[in-house]
Image: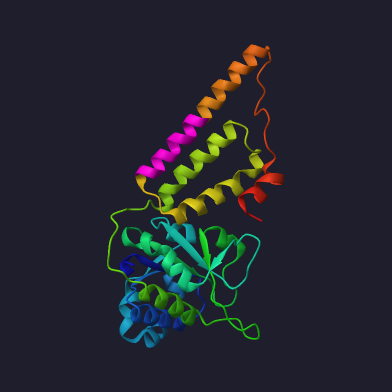
Amino acid sequence: MNLKNIVIVLTNPDESRNVGAVCRAMANNGITTLRIVGKKSKFDEERVRILAIHAAYIWENAEFFDSITEATRDCSIAAGTTRRRGKKRGKLLLPEEFALDVERTSENGKVAVVFGNERTGLTEEEIDECTMGVTIPSDEGFPSLNLSHAVQIVCYQLFRTQSGQSNGIVPVSLGRLEKTVSTIADDLEKIGFFKVTGRNDMEKFWRDILSRASISEGEAAYIEQTFNKAAGLAGKNRLLIDKADGIRPEKNPGSIDFDVLGKNQTGIV
């Protein structure tokens, strides 16, 4: 685990003191990169520093963004933390499972852990901007955790999973991964695999899977070449069949209704 590649993202936090407490929690565990979705002018510097104490340098170096997607564009994984299992949230990992799962990726690529607003947590739309989910179990009678406490728990598990060894693999960023995901979706659409309305679900499926796989630039390029060639061969074969049968080619022949079948096939419910 390379803690220098761990990025903590706070999504529109309300309370300045909570931001300061988050800085202290991060410093306790050797994690120093803080990004905030929101405007810096919204926060009270003095209140942040009171709770940050000697970790105020994390606040001073914090970066501010307009969205989770922008804040995590250079990361290979964006993990959203949530206590609710919504229909779009998929499998949620425990903090200790998450730490082990991303250890390889963090050696050479950035891993973002995204925390929601203190009152509302991450919305379904914000979860959609992440590629995996993490949950911290708590008592049903009082399930809501303080923001800094949640950050402390996750950062502690990451801190405990340090290995100090690099595997030499540099995983692509989520920004770069978008090209691969678009290529896959374009090629599947060309061969009539799904209707246009199923494209968003298909793209999210591949984005989440490939992000967790921590693929390299070479692997991303190979995947793109594979789907491009498959689409090309499918188109060529369809033309040969239609020519032999004397049939005029149809647009997207034999397309699959992804709205009906795709979600069950991919595990997206």
**190 or 266: nearer the eye?**
266
Q: Position of residue 189 (x, y in %)?
A: 59, 35
Q: Quadrant of residue 86?
A: bottom right
Residue drawn at 42 percent across, 71 percent down: 40
Membership of 223 in magenta stretch: yes
Membership of 182 in magenta stretch: no
Quarter of the picture containing the N terminus is bottom left
Residue drawn at 56 percent across, 58 percent down: 128
218 lies above or below 142: above
Residue drawn at 60 percent across, 22 percent down: 238
Q: Position of residue 29 (x, y in %)?
A: 35, 78
Residue drawn at 45 percent across, 84 percent down: 17
Q: Quadrant of residue 50?
A: bottom left
- Residue 188 appears in the figure: yes
Q: Quadrant of residue 161?
A: bottom left
Quarter of the picture containing the C terminus is bottom right
Residue 146 placement, left or right of 255: left
Q: Which residues are magenta?
A: 218-230
2 lies above or below 69: below
Q: Position of residue 192 (x, y in %)?
A: 63, 32
